Image (cartoon, rainbow, N blue to C red):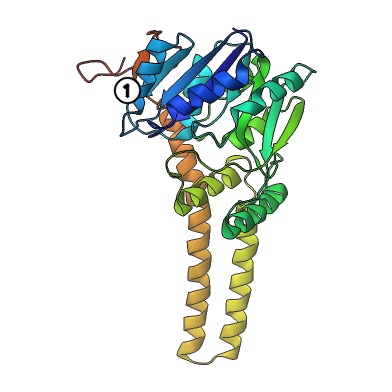
Amino acid sequence: MHLSIVVPCFNEEHGLQRLHDALVEALSGHVRDYEVILVDDGSTDRTLSEARRLSEHDPRYRYVSLSRNFGKEPAMLCGLRHARGHRVALLDADLQHPPRLLPRMLVLLDTGYDQVVARRSRSGERAWRSASSRVYYRLASRWLDVRLQDGAGDFRVLSRRAADALLSLPEHHRFSKGLFAWIGFDTGWVTYRNVPRETGESRWRLSDLVDHGIDGLTAFNDKPLRPAIYLGLLVAGLAGVLAALADGEKRWAAVLLGFSGVQVLMLGVLGEYVGRGYAESRRRPHYLVKETGPVPELLPGEHRLCTAGQVS
């Protein structure tokens, strides 16, 4: 198999046929043989029915349906595990990752790279989101042990060596942008203009983006622990100054307020890391498989829900 294309899907019933047509148009005459793995991440619409229909009409299409919505990271991991190609592409189903770029990315991959990343511009993006992204990547460049590129997301093509390296990483909390950077290997870049969604609306809320950003900042370093100590000392020092300037009950109130702030801050930072360690120690699977097609077998490390409700 020359190329495997992994597509995480959540409520994309109206977009899968468009994705199919765009892939056919983009890859015809460029890729000898390829497969498309549609990972239904617990959709509540007819995404699974559309995936079944596509797999029945086009033998290049396979699907894996998860038992519920586990999130995009587990869905991508599932698709990577099922990919059989010498090269593996990751892209979204909403066509914001233009399939027309794939031939160009594959040519670049064959020049000796193990990763070719499509990096989008911020043109057409909402001002608040563009500004917050710039701030986040500046923080990431200073705090993380890996280097993240602004505009570089999950849309990329991997060599088999790079895909196997990703699959060898066992952690439960997966922040793929960081994992892509952590495995290293030579990386090529393709730049493209931001593309609006063809169908539906983005399921990424502001709270989801914030949580995803925190995952990235804490997944690849323990540096927040050290600033927490410094900040604690600073707040304690300010509390001491306020206590010296105040008198009577106000003095003690300032001291208590300062030390309470330090304790809450430290508990929050420590709790983030303790929670991650607890999640890793449970050793739960990243996802559960409800249905696969047309290839029925499970892969090592996967679990299927049995008819009796048990896990095998």
Rendered image quadrant of residue 30: top right
**Residue 116 percent coordinates (x, y):** 71, 27
Q: Nearer the viewer, residue 137 or 167?
A: 137
Q: Work out which quarter of the rendered image holds the C terminus and state it.
A: top left
Above or below residue 297? Residue 162 is below
Q: Residue furthest bottom?
A: 247
**Residue 48 percent coordinates (x, y):** 34, 24
Please tell me which residue is depicted at 49% across the width and 31% down the height of the picture.
Answer: 93
Mark 1 sits on what residue? 49
Characterize the local packing of mark 1: few (<14), some (14-19) or many (20 or more) Cα atoms within 10 angstroms: few
Q: Nearer the viewer, residue 266 or 103?
A: 103
Answer yes or no: is residue 298 visible.
no
Answer yes or no: is residue 60 visible.
yes
Above or below residue 155? Residue 295 is above
Residue type, numbered disc 1: Ser
Q: Work out which quarter of the rendered image holds the N terminus and state it.
A: top right
- Left or right: 231 in relation to 271: right
**Residue 49 percent coordinates (x, y):** 32, 22
